Structures are given as structure tokens and as C-alpha cells.
Image (cartoon, coloured by chain):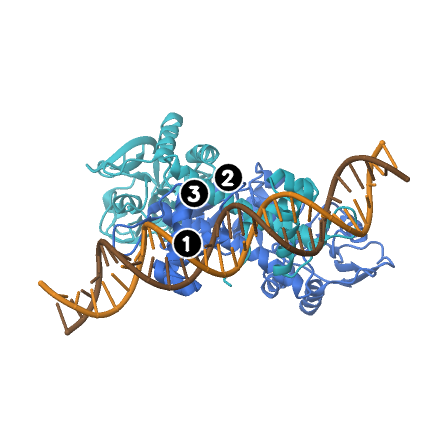
Chain colours: A cyan, B blue, C brown, D orange
DNA sequence: CAAATCCATCACAAATACCGATATTCTCTA
DNA sequence: TAGAGAATATCGGTATTTGTGATGGATTTG
């Protein structure tokens, strides 16, 4: 036998635990008492454990029974989730919502929307991917994500529908021990050139998305956190989103770097919520998009 | 009908997903192909969704099907835990192991023993309680805990058998505003289940990384840093390496969460592992005690 | 002490799940 | 391009599972 455990057995078990007796459980479940009794009996039999102490007037849960009731609740909750997802699909929801977020995008502004989302669609499986610059766009075109929260440089591509959400200001920074930190004036192209620039790049297509390159020597990183390690270690300079470095600057662990004729827009880079034109958002995706636009 | 979803249907579904065809699933499950076909047919019918695309030679999972297969795996895993607990009991194990730890108890070396415990008894539900100084002792005398890890001042009472030990660590954490942060005792699976767990997963094969899943609801992340953002935002709980969260904990931006296999006390005096004389330890409890004494 | 409630057991009936055969569609190879 | 092999849906018959209803023993309640 593959496995003879039945959800029905578990439903009966927890119902008994809830209402306190076999008979009452029978009434609640619309079955005769003997059916309940037999169901529990076969459950005990197959699992080889004793769930109830039958010596008294009404059966009481054994220690084992108590624990297994809790386990059963988990199984049933899980099963309910299965049915919940199915129901969502039946009512027009997408089966899951995949969200891709580029690494430079701050999470904070999205958390409220997302917790509202999980309230509005409690059974919707949500997944996130953050996998390097350009990852969101690639996944959008892949159809492996429904929504991308990303930069779109130099411009919004034709096949993408995008809504601007917010801007992140970028700040060039360097560790205090680095030569550029002691410059004492705005850095020119000449100043920057000899030093290593720590750039984020698309892991799949390292040649793309290299905006704001100023140095000749650069090291590529896919992971923002790892780049930060190297930055703090005085390995080179780079631009970082302001929200990630402001406390580090305040603590003196990083020094802001002023660049002459910096091509990076003063008001910051625009973060878009995007989806592909040819695959419209599902109900939940649309909801999230609307909510984001309303909030931001 | 109370609920007509069947574990058998789910077993059939995931088997098909694994082996790739109805016929092969039938062979694997020892059933005729038509039985498989009918099972899936009724499952689709009852849930009101289309799981397979039947136009081709062999049915292929729809998007909905793919998601529901993952959900089904979770349900089956949960069911397997149920049966695992039952099996443990059948083989003489205690149905659960309750461990009480006093709040002042430091905690370094417990984690190795406990992860060894969860390896030796993978389905044993373990719960921790921490509820004030003297709580362990009270629970021991209550018979509501099997083992107490506690201070015993001024001396070991007569009714208690106690062995002096030392310390441990690994970190489940949650933001201060999260409900789990206000639990006030060790979290059991039942406590965790309703809350979102923030899990790291393989972006290529999101189904693979389901180790350590305790909640039924979880959001997947590829990126550790982004997960941390959501964690700090109070979105859910997760386990984090201690070196990454210790400063956050110090800042009060995170709260450590004591759960089943991850106890997290701090510094203290002489710590004993204790149990009452008149209720000898079960198999797993004895195992844990021996392991602790061997290591410390 | 009587009435009511609860549970286990048993035989029978109903539901349901499986099997085997068949028709059809698709893939792969000669 | 034809033919063999394999996959699936459908259908009727059978077998197994599951629920019913009645009965008897035990406990609580008033």
C-alpha cells in the first residue's frame, strides 16, 4: 500500500478533539456515531497507536492522541491551502504570483503593499527573485515572472508596460582609507580612472546595463551585499543607493564622493513596476500594481 | 460533504508529476492506467481546475497544475510527519519532547545536541518553553515538561535528578512588531503555522529547498538581504545565522525566536539538565541528556 | 433508580474505487 | 510513409471500502 492515511480520518480526529465526543462529532459531520467510531478504530489500527482512552464514559485523548491531533491540524491546514489555491484559480486568480526585484531597489516601500496583498489573497503563493541587474527584465521576457520591480535604463523597452513608482538617489561612495576619500574636491574623470570601480552587472549578460561606468578598471558583482563588503574593505568606489549607505556614511565607515559632471541624474533613478505587454497581469498582480501606484 | 479532497488524489498527482505520465504513475503505484486517469479527472472536477493539458500525446501540467503539485507536496510532507510521529510512538518513543529552559540560561552548546536530536528523531515534535525564572522547575513538577534546562538555586531539590551542563546558539528571529515576538514562550509548530515563514529557495528549482519548513504559509526569496528587509519589516519569521543578526538584535530591530530545534538563551550561572525522579525520561529525552553530557 | 448519553460491535446496504477491454491519438522507427 | 508501440479517455462490471441502523453494556445526570 502506498499510504493508507486519509484526510477524512484526520478530519474526523480533529472534529472529535474539538467537540469532545464521538457522537457529537458524528452529528457535526453528518454521520452516524458508529461511523466515527470505526473510522478512529481503523486509524488507530493502521497507525498502530492508541489515540483515545476508552475506559471512561467518553473517550479522552491520550498523550499521543494530543500530539497527533496537532499534527493533524497542520495536515488539514495544508490541505486547506491546496484547496484555497484551487479555489483562487477557479475564481480567476493566477495560480501564483512571481515578483522579480532588482537588487538596487529598496524593500521598505513595498512591504506595506505586500502585507496587504497577503491579506487580500491569503492563499496565493508568492515568490521573489532578486538575481542581479537585468534579472527582472530577463525574467519578464522569459515569462518566469509576472511583475518586475526594476530599473529600466536607458529607457522603457517597447514590449514592456511600466509604471514609475519611486526614485532612488544614488551616492558615489568610497571607504575612508581609499585615496579618493582624501581628494578634497570633486573628482574628475581623470581622478577616477586609475581606481577600481565596483559595478553591479547582469550575471547572464555581463555586457549589458553598464551605465555610469567611469573607471577603466572595474570589478563586477552580481550581489549587492558582496559588493558592499569590498567597498567597505577599501577595494574601490561605486555608486550606491542612498538608503543603503546613509547610516554607513554617518558612522564614518564610508565617505561620499563628489563627481564632476556626474551623468547620474540628481533626482535619482526611476524604479518601475513592469510587466510584459503580451502577458497581462492576473487579478492579484493587477491588485498589487494598483496598490503600489496608489501608495507611491 | 465536509471536504472531499483525498490524500490519495494528491499522491497520484505528485507521482504523475514525478514520473511524467499517467501510465507510468499507474505502474509505479500498482494501479491500472484508467484508475489514474479517473482519479485525476475527479480531482479536477471537484476542485474545478484543469491540472493537465490533454491535447498532446501525454498530458502536461498547466500553470495551475504546477503550483498545485507543489502545494500537494507540502500536504504530503505534512501527512508524512503525522505518520512519522505515529511510527515513533509505535516504536516506543515518547510522542513529544517538551523542554523547558529558564530565561537566564546561556545557550551555546545545545544546538549541536538538538540538531543531532532532530536527526536521530526527525519526526519527534520538540517544544520549548521559557516562561520566567523557576518556570522550568514548576513545569517539571507539573509533568508538563520532560527536561528542564535551568538554574537550580540554591541547591538541587530532592525530587529532581540534575546534571550540570554548559551552553548553545542558532537564530530564529522576527521583528519586534510581529505576533510571534510576543509569544513569551518557545514556539511550537502550531504557533508558527499561521505565520508567514520567509524561506530562501533555489531560483531554478523552487521546490527543492523545502528543508526546515515549519509554517504552512511561506514566501520564497532568492536573496538573503531582501529577505532580511522583509524580516525587519515584520513580515514573517525565519532562521538567520547569528552573526548576521546579533547587532540587529542589540539594536532592538530584531527579536530572537525560540522554536523547536533552535533554542536561544544567553549567559548564565550553573545550568542543569534536569528531570523529575518519579517520571523517568523517554527514549529521546534520555538520548538528549546523554548527548548533552557527552558534549559538555 | 430511571432516563439520557455515550461507545463498540455487527450485519447489511450504499457508495466508490479499481479493473479490464476498447477506441483514439500520438510518437518513433524502419 | 506505414506500422508498431505507447499513451489516454471512456465504459461496464466487480470488488472493496465505507456508512447505516440496531443492539447491548457502561456511565453520567437528575
List the residue tagged with mark 3.
B46
Numbered circle sitting on residue B235: 2
Alpha carbon separation for disc pair 1 and 3: 14 Å
Front position among marks 2 and 3 = 3
The x and y percentages for residue A14 are 63, 45
| Res. A283 image quadrant | top left
Q: Is residue C8 left or right of residue A187?
A: right
List the residue tagged with mark 1.
B13
Q: For the residue labelled by badge 1, is the local secondary structure a helix, a strand or a loop? A: helix
Q: Name the chain under label 1.
A: B
Q: Tell me, yes or no, whether dots 1 and 2 are on the same chain.
A: yes
| Res. A117 image quadrant | top left
The x and y percentages for residue B82 are 58, 55
Q: Name the chain under label 2.
A: B
| Res. A25 image quadrant | top right
Asked whether residue A126 is in view, the answer is no
Of label 2 and label 3, which has the lower sequence position? 3
Of label 1 and label 2, which has the lower sequence position? 1
Amino acid at each position: 500500500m502506498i499510504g493508507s492515511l486519509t484526510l477524512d480520518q484526520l478530519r474526523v480526529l480533529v472534529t472529535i478533539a474539538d467537540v469532545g465526543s464521538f457522537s457529537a462529532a458524528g452529528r457535526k459531520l453528518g454521520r452516524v456515531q458508529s461511523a466515527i467510531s470505526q473510522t478512529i478504530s481503523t486509524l488507530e489500527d493502521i497507525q498502530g497507536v492508541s489515540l483515545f482512552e476508552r475506559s471512561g464514559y467518553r473517550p479522552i485523548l491520550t498523550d499521543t492522541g494530543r500530539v497527533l491531533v496537532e499534527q493533524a491540524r497542520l495536515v488539514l491546514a495544508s490541505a486547506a491551502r491546496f484547496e484555497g489555491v484551487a479555489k483562487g484559480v477557479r475564481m480567476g486568480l493566477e495560480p501564483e504570483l512571481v515578483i522579480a526585484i532588482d537588487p538596487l531597489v529598496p524593500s521598505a516601500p513595498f512591504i506595506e503593499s505586500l502585507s496587504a496583498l497577503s491579506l487580500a489573497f491569503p492563499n496565493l503563493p508568492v515568490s521573489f527573485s532578486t538575481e542581479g541587474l537585468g534579472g527582472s527584465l530577463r525574467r519578464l521576457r522569459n515569462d518566469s515572472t509576472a511583475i518586475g520591480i526594476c530599473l529600466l535604463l536607458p529607457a522603457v523597452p517597447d514590449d514592456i508596460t511600466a509604471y514609475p513608482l519611486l526614485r532612488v538617489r544614488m551616492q558615489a561612495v568610497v571607504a575612508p582609507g581609499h585615496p579618493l576619500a582624501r581628494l578634497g574636491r570633486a573628482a574628475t574623470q581623470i581622478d577616477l580612472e586609475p581606481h577600481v570601480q565596483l559595478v553591479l552587472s547582469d550575471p547572464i549578460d555581463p555586457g549589458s546595463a553598464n551605465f555610469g561606468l567611469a573607471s577603466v578598471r572595474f570589478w563586477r558583482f552580481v550581489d549587492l551585499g558582496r559588493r558592499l563588503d569590498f567597498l567597505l574593505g577599501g577595494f574601490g568606489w561605486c555608486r550606491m543607493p542612498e538608503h543603503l549607505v546613509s547610516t554607513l556614511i554617518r558612522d564614518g565607515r564610508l565617505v561620499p564622493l563628489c563627481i564632476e559632471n556626474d551623468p547620474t541624474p540628481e533626482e535619482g533613478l526611476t524604479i518601475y513596476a513592469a510587466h510584459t505587454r503580451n502577458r497581462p497581469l492576473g487579478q492579484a498582480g493587477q491588485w498589487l500594481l494598483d496598490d503600489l501606484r496608489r501608495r507611491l
